[in-house]
Amino acid sequence: MTLSEINWTRRGFLGRAAIGTGAVISGEAALQLLTSTRVWAAAAQGDLDVLNFALTLEYLEADFYQQVNASGTVTDAKAKDLFALIGADELAHVSALMGTVTKLGGTPVAKPTIKYPDGVFKDYATIVKVSKTFEEVGVGAYLGQAGAIENPDILQAAAGIFGVECRHAALIGKLAGLTPEGGIYMGATETPKPKADVLTAVMPFIS
Amino acid sequence: MDSQPFGGEPVIHFEDEDSRRGFLKYAALIGVGATLAAACGNSSSSSSSTPSPSATASGSPFGEGDVGVLNYALTLEYLEADFYSKAPQALLGEDFKYIAPIAMHEAAHVQALLATLQKLNATPAKKPTLKYPDGTFTDKMTFLKTASAFEETGVKAYHGQVTVIKDKAILGAAASIAGVESRHAAILNDLLGQKQVPAPVEGHATVAETVAIVTPFLGG
């Protein structure tokens, strides 16, 4: 993802906000969502695959926040605290996922080589934008895998991690001063992202 | 727990998970079931196709299977939607802009769950009669604390059902609602100056644990 694309994504958030609170899902739309299998049935290739997919995203997030927190670019006390908190959460997710894959007899996927657009860590506004993008992608990624997980313990853990990514996304949205509906909250329901869309979103960051 | 459950802090066990769990271990489900029965206006001795509040063998007073889960969620959403519909705009001032969307979300969750239950030809749980401690809507911090407690309770309640839900579409939809509750919880905690993300992985609660927490609000 290039910076211009990140900008586009942000405009997308704001564009939704311009619609106003009409972004809230209607009962009818929610019903369609509830009774649709189009998203949830996707890509059941085994729990290990899901875990390694999640691990790859968490590597990316954890690496990003480590660099943010080491950059010195974030100077506001509240923002610093938030980025430190999120960074610690993402590291915890990485080790939890690695441990789970190992426990299941699998091999944790290796951390990818990660690249960032030039100057990302020197500009606070860019850091916030990339952070929001990563968190929203994470939210959609976990939700998109909900129907693919068979093991109840893994499903339980994934749900707990998913919720934390939702928290991060909302908090970064608030930190950025985005509009409440469409910037902090993304409607009455979260939107799942198919695996292919997630990979498309993060591939530019992975060498 | 029925007579003076609040003392200014509606859900006092929330921030300390260990003591909360310790407390709930001793919370009697019998009393909880009786209160719910009164709240729903049902006879606790009669059992019919309508969701019965009396505890079942599996411990859910909301019925079995996915319909039971949906009615459990609906009852919680009724509570949240009712609570936010009373949000004191003037008192909240600038912060009201963060609360107004939450009210809409909870109302949308109620409608979605009702529609889903109807689609499944199931009888939706009735909206319980609700009561709130004095000061809930006249003191800003009390309102926000109550809101935060409801959201954290809701998050854990939804997570507690992910391994219970059979239908993948319902699982996905429930998760998509749970994530919104997580956003609410984080923002409310932020407004309160509390830790926005209490743990790197959110916890989960059983029906009995959740019912014990929300029971003081039922049956006004």
Image: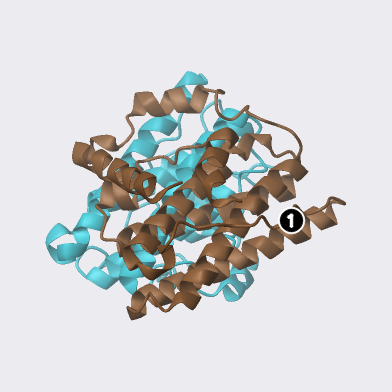
Chain colours: A brown, B cyan
x and y percent of residue A55 in the render?
67, 53
Residue depicted at x 35% and y 67%: A123
On the image, which quarter does residue A108 sit in?
bottom right
Where does label 1 land, which residue? A110
Q: What element carries label 1?
A: loop
The amino acid pointed to by label 1 is Ala
x and y percent of residue A130 in the render?
42, 56
On the image, which quarter does residue A45 sit in?
top right
Seen as rendered, the residue at the extreme left is B90
Residue depicted at x 61% and y 74%: B18
Please say if B215 is above or below B171. below
x and y percent of residue A82 in the render?
42, 71
Residue depicted at x 67% and y 46%: A53
Residue depicted at x 25% and y 40%: A15
Q: Label 1 lies in what chain? A: A
Please say if A119 is above or below A20. below
B140 relative to A170 in the view: left or right: left
